[in-house]
Image (cartoon, rainbow, N blue to C red):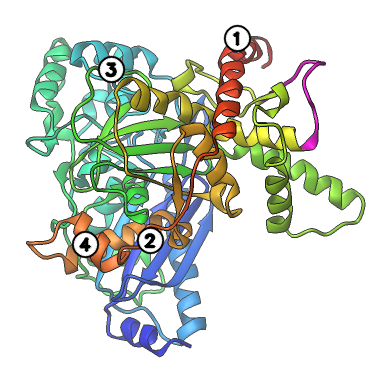
Amino acid sequence: MDNNAKQTILEGKAILGIEFGSTRIKAVLIDEQNNPIAQGSHLWENQLVDGLWTYSIDRIWFGVQDCYRDLRENVLTQYGVEIENLGAIGISAMMHGYMAFDKNEKILVPFRTWRNTNTGEAAAVLSKIFNYNIPLRWSISHLYQAILNDEPHVPEITFLTTLAGYIHWQITGDKVLGIGDASGMLPIDPETKNYSAKMVEEFDRLIASKGYPWKLEDILPTVLPAGKNAGKLTPSGAEKLDISGHLKPGIPVCPPEGDAGTGMVATNAVKQRTGNVSAGTSSFSMIVVEKELSKPYEMIDMVTTPDGSLVAMVHCNNCTSDLNAWINIFKEYNELFGMDIEPDELYGRLYRNALKGDADCGGVISYNYFSGEPVTGLKEGRPLFVRSVSDRFNLANFMRANLNAAVAVLKIGNDILFNDEKIKVDRITGHGGLFKTKGVGQRILAAALNSPISVMETAGEGGAWGMALLASYLVNNREDRNLADFLEIDVFHGNVGEKVDPVPEEVEGFNRYIENYIAGLNIEKAAVKYKK
């Protein structure tokens, strides 16, 4: 038993971060040195209801309560103590989406997640009016699409927020949002660190004829940068998190953030000219840029770090889901022959074998589209593996093609940043499930982006740890130390992780793979059209 950790918990100095991921809700408790000392989790899945991806309110609350219960029981088992008090709490969740509430705090329509791609008309209109790329998944796209559809709930809206903003509101009573998460609702003005006043005005003008009883600014959460006070845990909020009744109210809660922001924090990538790639169920790259891009790009979203610096984000709806599905086929094969191979061993062997394949995968291509992929213009997806009789089809090339597919769309977007916009980056850090097998995901991504990729041991702690660090920054920051300095000095102590450089032959091979991939997109589009 770690007696220092036990004492930290007993004294109420431990700090809690909770993150709602797409397949898991995770809680991480950290000590005064920002090291994880306990964890809890809850597995969940989204549901397709009436053609839209959602998580029900009941599932949301059962999930976070079960996650906290798991954390509490793990603390009891490890340290023999109850969690009564905490130094601070932070809530994070999947960015974007649509949660609209009426004056009685009742949700008006089921939560519409980032995964929905039904907002094409709205996003196109707003992008043109704002002269700014407005992605399909952003909250403002969902709102305007509901208006275009004349949905009857729209006049009743009194509050519009994200999942993280909703949980934070319910446990503190404060309708606020961290600036990074807010930048996925509506563009942020880098000068004012608030929603773009120009775009707010343009939106209100656009919908004026509807005569709604609200203005846009009235229904959006207040924007807060990292380190600012965002309220305290209320008695009812404590009951919502800890159904055992041990957790006390009054705990400071930091601004709620999106999973993109916590990924940047967990990889020490909030400083300009740094970046990170998160690769799990979905994937995204975040490059902290020094200035605005020369023009809007449909493939690139402009969001912010948790302290308000501009970030060029390439978001991909699909990453490892199809890869995991193929691994499961191999698992079933093993079971058929009575072989019991641990999942980590199975993944590791198949991943490492992929590196023995041809740099261009022998011509075979994989499209990992479980859902639509806006970057490549697909509103729906069909997982697809494509080869011709002349391609070199073997296990190594098969696995390498699936690994390449996991980052192919990321490459398409980032080629614009590095080749067209000449963006400079000093360090890119990878985190997420794709990098769990040491060296393999790194090497594939290094070839895709033609850039060195670092992975830190702590990156496996993920966004919940990143959120805990933001909560730590709330209570430990100093006026002379910004978030980047806090992370560099107090958390990472100069550690930049283990770096893998791109191999020229593999860069060339990935370029050939992506040429085939882009040329074959019409095959994927045909699959969407003809395979229901």
Q: Nearer the viewer, mark 1 or mark 3?
A: 1
Disc 4 residue crowd, few under 14, some 14–19, many 20+, Cα 10 Å:
many
Which residue type does callout 2 highlight? Answer: Trp
Q: Which residue is mark 1?
A: 522
Left/right of residue 186 with respect to residue 110 in the rendered view: left
Is the residue 297 above or below the residue 463 in the image?
A: above
Residue appearing at x 44%, y 58% in the figure: 456
Closest to the observer, 347 or 153: 347
Closest to the observer, 33 or 24: 33
Is the residue 64 above or below the residue 115 in the image?
A: below
Label 1 sits on a secondary structure element that is: helix
> Which of disc 1 and disc 2 is earlier in sequence?
2
Closest to the observer, 487 or 163: 487
The image quarter in which residue 244 lies: bottom left
> Which of disc 2 and disc 3 is earlier in sequence?
3
Tag 2–tag 4 contact (CB < 8 Å): no
Q: Which residue is mark 4?
A: 486
Q: Which residues are magenta?
A: 384-395
Label 2 sits on a secondary structure element that is: helix
